[in-house]
Structure formats: C-alpha cells, structure tokens
C-alpha cells in the first residue's frame, strides 16, 4: 500500500490539532498516532545504528556529522546498546577514539546539559562498567 515509510511531523501535528468528532475518528487517529510513533522509533533506531557503523568504519567525518546533528538531542544514544558501542569503540582506531572523546566532551560541556544528560545516564553507566 505504501511505498515508503516516512514521518512527516507537520502533517502529523496538523492531524492532531483538531478534536475528534466521534469515536470512529478518534479510533482512526489513535491508529495513525501509533503508526507515526512506530515509524519515528524505527528512524531513530536507524540513526543510532548509523553511528555504530561509522565508528566501526572509523569514519570520523560522519561520526562528527551525527554528533553535530544530534548534539543537543535526547535521541543521540536512545537506541544504542552499551556493549555494542563499547566493542566498536575498543576496536576503533586511535584517531576515531580521540574524535569520539572530543565530541562527547563537547556534548557534556553544553549549557543545556540537563536536557539530555538524564537520558544518556543509563548508557554512560553501562559503558563505565565495561571499563572496570
């Protein structure tokens, strides 16, 4: 039916701007909302997997692009599994590790750190256990 799954936030927001007139409309809206959230989750997970792939390939330029794009976002590490990230970092080239270290340092010296540090905390704690 659909050729491509795409998340169109403006269209989604417009849909929910108006109230549902009856139960059938409300039910359809909920189905659309669930579908929208599923697509968004898949897109976010894909972005997380891209970061892992770029670390594995020692592609510092693309790692930097991901960090710049999501530096102040709570979604940067949302779908990354700590042991996967750790294994990719440990096997990365020294320059790639230095780049990641600098990017993380930059991320956590921001004045808005409270907006995303809480969401990153679990991953960071898990990474810490691998270094002990």
Image: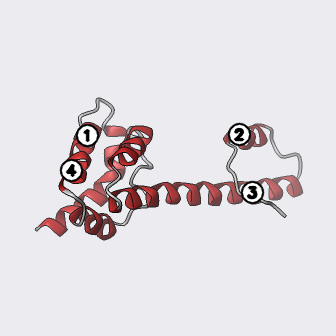
Rounded to the nearest whole Å, what is the CA distance between mark 3 and mark 1? 37 Å
Q: Earlier in the sequence, mark 4 or mark 2?
A: 2
Residue 125 placed where, x, y %? 23, 60
Residue 53 placed where, x, y %? 40, 61
Nearer the observer: mark 3 or 1; the answer is: 1
Q: Earlier in the sequence, mark 2 or mark 1?
A: 2
Rounded to the nearest whole Å, what is the CA distance between mark 1 and mark 4? 20 Å
What is the image's colouring? secondary structure
Q: Are marks 2 and 3 in contact (CB under 8 Å)?
A: no
Nearer the observer: mark 1 or 4; the answer is: 4
Q: Are marks 2 and 1 in contact (CB under 8 Å)?
A: no
Q: Nearer the viewer, residue 45 or 11?
A: 45
In the image, residue 1 sits, relative to residue 43, either above or below, namely below
Residue 114 image-quadrant placement:
top left
State the residue position of label 4.
Answer: 95
State the residue position of label 3.
Answer: 30
Which quadrant does the N terminus fall into? bottom right
Q: Residue furthest left?
A: 132
Q: Circle 4 sits in a helix, a strand or a loop, which is it? A: helix
Rounded to the nearest whole Å, what is the CA distance between mark 2 and mark 3? 13 Å
State the residue position of label 1.
Answer: 108
Q: Are marks 1 and 4 in contact (CB under 8 Å)?
A: no
State the residue position of label 2.
Answer: 13
Residue 24 placed where, x, y %? 88, 57
Q: Earlier in the sequence, mark 2 or mark 3?
A: 2
Rounded to the nearest whole Å, what is the CA distance between mark 4 and mark 2? 42 Å
| Callout 4 crowding tier (Cα within 10 Å): few <14, some 14–19, many ≥20 | few
Q: Earlier in the sequence, mark 3 or mark 4?
A: 3
């Amino acid at each position: 039916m659909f050729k491509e799954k795409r998340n169109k936030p403006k269209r989604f927001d417009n849909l929910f701007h108006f109230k549902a007139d009856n139960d059938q409309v409300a039910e359809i809206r909920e189905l659309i909302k669930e579908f929208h959230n599923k697509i968004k989750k898949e897109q976010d997970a894909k972005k997380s997997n891209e970061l892992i792939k770029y670390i594995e390939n020692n592609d510092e330029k693309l790692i930097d692009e991901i960090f710049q794009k999501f530096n102040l976002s709570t979604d940067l590490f949302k779908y990354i599994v700590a042991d996967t990230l750790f294994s990719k970092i440990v096997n990365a080239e020294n320059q790639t590790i230095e780049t990641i270290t600098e990017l993380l340092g930059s991320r956590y010296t921001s004045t808005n750190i409270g907006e995303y540090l809480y969401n990153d905390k679990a991953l960071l704690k898990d990474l810490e256990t691998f270094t002990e």
